[in-house]
């Protein structure tokens, strides 16, 4: 188990953000033909492992992740609000089902610099829903 300094010693305030990496496979059976989208609940662009994550702030909500020792079929949810017309193509014009989804939590120091990250979830998209008000 990783020791995350940002949450050690029962700190009363932990500043963190969720970072989501979505890998869409454009062609069945060809994992090299893919498109990667990255976004986060941060309010500033952040780079993790060479990937820059687009800041969405409060427009991104990530549900709880099941914590099991072995592989499980537990679900997690991601909610994106306020998607503009240019970005709705990701949901309507691509093959979201079967896409790889990775969630990382990032921790900030007292100066709001990203100091540590912890991988939280890896899975595939099995279903999605689009709602319009």
Image (cartoon, rainbow, N blue to C red):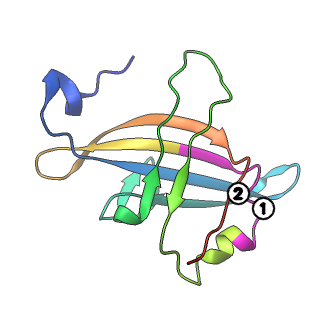
Q: Earlier in the sequence, mark 2 or mark 1?
A: 2
Q: Residue at x 44, y 60 (%)?
A: 60
Q: Is residue 56 visible?
A: no
Q: Considering only vertical position in the picture, is 79 above or below 48?
A: below
Relative placement, left or right, of 58 versus 9 is right
Q: Quadrant of residue 102?
A: top right
Quarter of the image for the N terminus: give it.
top left
Q: Considering only vertical position in the picture, is 52 above or below 72?
A: below
Magenta-drawn segment? 92-102
Relative placement, left or right, of 1 versus 129 is left
Secondary structure beneath label 1? loop
Secondary structure beneath label 2? strand
Q: Which residue is mark 1?
A: 95
Q: Which residue is mark 2?
A: 24
Q: Considering only vertical position in the picture, is 133 above or below 70?
A: below
**Label 2: few (<14), some or many (≥20) within 10 Å?**
many
Q: Residue at x 50, y 24 (%)?
A: 67
As drawn, which residue projects farthest toward the bottom? Answer: 85
Quarter of the image for the C terminus: give it.
bottom right
Q: Residue at x 22, y 45 (%)?
A: 15
Q: Disc 2 to disc 1, how far (Cα)?
A: 7 Å
Relative placement, left or right, of 93 versus 65 is right
- Are the residues at dot 2 and dot 1 in contact (C-beta closer than 8 Å)? yes
Residue 44, position in %: x, y? 30, 65
Q: In the depicted view, which residue is nearer to us: 90 or 28? A: 90
Q: Residue at x 72, y 72 (%)?
A: 92
Q: Is residue 20 visible?
A: yes
Q: Quadrant of residue 88?
A: bottom right
Residue 99, position in %: x, y? 71, 51
Q: Nearer the viewer, mark 2 or mark 1?
A: 1
Residue 129, position in %: x, y? 67, 61
């Amino acid at each position: 188990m990783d020791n995350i300094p940002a949450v050690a010693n029962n700190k009363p305030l932990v500043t963190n953000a969720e970072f989501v990496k979505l890998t869409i496979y454009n062609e069945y059976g060809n994992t090299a033909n893919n498109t990667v989208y990255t976004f986060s609940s941060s309010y500033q662009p952040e780079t993790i492992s060479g990937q820059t994550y687009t800041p969405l702030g409060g427009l991104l909500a990530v549900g709880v992740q099941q914590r099991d020792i072995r592989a499980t079929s537990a679900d997690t949810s991601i909610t994106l609000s306020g998607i503009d017309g240019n970005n709705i193509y990701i949901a309507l014009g691509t093959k979201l089902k079967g896409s790889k989804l990775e969630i990382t939590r990032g921790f900030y120091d007292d100066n709001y610099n990203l100091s540590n990250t912890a991988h939280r979830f890896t899975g595939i998209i099995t279903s999605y829903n689009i709602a319009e008000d």
